[in-house]
Image (cartoon, coloured by chain):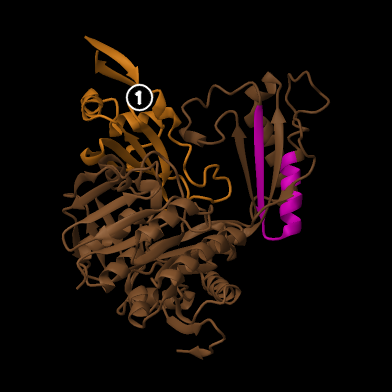
Amino acid sequence: MTKSLKVICPNGHLGFAPLKTESFRIAVEAGTDYIAADSGSDDIGPVPLGSDTCASPRAWQEHDLEVMLLAARKTGKPMIIGSAGDTGTNSRVDMYVEIIRDLARKHDLAPFRLGWFYSEVDKEAVRASIRGGSPVRGLDGRPDLDEAELDATDRIVAMAGVHPFRALLEEGCDVIIGGRSSDSAIFAAAALHEGFPDAQAYYLGKVLECASFCAEPYGAKETVMGEITPEWVEVTAMHPEQRCTVASVAGHAMYERSNPFHEYVAGGLLDMTNCHYEQVSEKTTRVTGMKFVPAEEFRVKLEGSGRLGARFVGMAGIRDPYTIANVDAVIEWARTQVRERFGDDGWELHYNVFGRNGIMGEMEPLKDKPAHELLIVVQGVAPTREMAEELTITGTRQLFYARLPEVKGTAGGVSFVFDEVMEASPGCRWTLNHTMAVNDPLALFPTHSEIVGSDVLETA
Amino acid sequence: MMTTKKLSELAKTIRSKNAGTDKITFDVIFRERDVYEMVKRSGALTRASVSALFNIGDNRITDFVEYDPAYAIKFTILRPRPSGSPGDPDIFGAQQYAPLLDVDVTVDA
């Protein structure tokens, strides 16, 4: 096997904000064996998955894919992308595959093998698991999935581990577009394919997945380089002003996760409890002591989102201190008008009171000390567009007419930036954050590949 | 001699962020080991103190970890509802840390 392997990551969420090209160029010139990035996140809320859309402009995604593809084909090194288009649904994978084909044509690239896999899961397959006596287990305190919650779901993706990436690397793919996948699996797959051990391979993935978030000073979207041997993983910042320090690398292990010691992936657990961090040069930190514990049962994480209805948004401001002190009564007035018009259920109306506790809700320690002016953001969700619009405009405009006994200002109780409501993305909800047992790690992730470039037509 | 400082004067990083769809995780990171150890000893950040600060039951705190390799104290809470549900004002969970800035820490002067 190879003695060491280098992998670079230019962006922790490809397409969410464009990668910075200078540190990427430096990394490519320094020499790398793989170029890889994750394009997904569940941070963006349930709407992109529920409505099968992207969270970012296509131009940014094309930008990053173009920069990476040109470097990969120029150097002849494989390029791997996971969780295409934020959610990794089938339509997002197809979109990225199409972008790669278009870029190959645009730049007249020499033929290469493009591989991709899908991650969407048919609801009926999940139902069959429930009915077959294999519970779909809830994560983070959620109960096991029942069929009612499944019926409320519009789209499900499974979180791939290294398996479909490895299958496509075995096929000799030069460029791989993945459906929804574990961030770390994208990088780990390359290292495992080259014969490195599990623990170091998954740690390599863990440390690289957010690009320069493991470096300091803070500066996102810059490239970092990981190097793996059977004994250790080193990570190096590529931006001239950034360094990977013991503090920044150890600190990254806890980023966006509830526990800094354990990382679960499909097929096992990366245990970082006994990791040892050592500064080996100015920009590089070496990590040893990671362990990998294979899972006894192969369970795959499922993410699901369900559409609740059409959604509109309204806004209203308050400056009168008496009205501010009684803002809950003002909101209750508007809500009552909505109830009289639409009945008690079949819709949702939400008020966020900025200037009081709009951001933290019940957790706000200062919720009894409102500011001298408030902004109320009103959201209405209903089965149809027409109903959602009328619901939201009722819930917003009736704030203006609220009847407070002592109010001096009788010409209108709120200020309007717009006397209208605006259509927003549909209201959606995360319905699945669960795991399902599967026998075959590849079962949920069908793979495909083809030769792209110079008008060669061949499909495998 | 003992004196009182704000956590924001002692920590290099105080942040919050989603940990998956159902949780928000908080990181308080220190630059120096002795400051980190001093804050740990002070008892200013415990399950009980953050539960009181954020007005949440202890059962909503899923993890509370003192993470020595990064000189960090880290805890994670369950959201009242999943991120991005209509009405959720902080889809990324990125602005929930502010009350931590003003936590009083009793330190050796």
The image position of residue A56, as x and y in percent, is 58, 56
Three-letter code, disc 1: Leu
Q: Count the marks.
A: 1
Colour of chain A in the rendered structure image: brown
The chain letter for the residue carrying disc 1 is: B
Above or below residue A123? Residue B107 is: above
Magenta span contains residue A425: no
The image position of residue A301, as x and y in percent, is 37, 65
Residue A11 visible at all: no
Q: Nearer the viewer, residue A58 or A343?
A: A58
Above or below residue A332? Residue A98 is: below
Residue plotted at (22% across, 24% down) = B38
- Would residue A236 be found to the left or right of residue A102 on screen? left
Name the residue carrying label 1.
B7
Residue B9 visible at all: yes
**Picture quarter with the N terminus of chain A:** bottom left
Q: Quadrant of residue A439?
A: bottom left
**Picture quarter with the C terminus of chain A:** bottom left
Residue plotted at (76% across, 28% down) = A413
- Would residue A108 be found to the left or right of residue A329 on screen? left
The image position of residue A294, as x and y in percent, is 20, 67
Residue situated furthest top in the rendering:
B1
Above or below residue A155? Residue A214 is: above
Above or below residue A190? Residue A440 is: below
Q: Residues within 10 Å of mark 1 (few under 14, many from 20)?
A: many
Q: Nearer the viewer, residue A296 or A333?
A: A296
Q: Nearer the viewer, residue A220 or B41?
A: A220
Colour of chain B in the rendered structure image: orange
Magenta span contains residue A379: yes
Q: Which residues are magenta?
A: A374-396
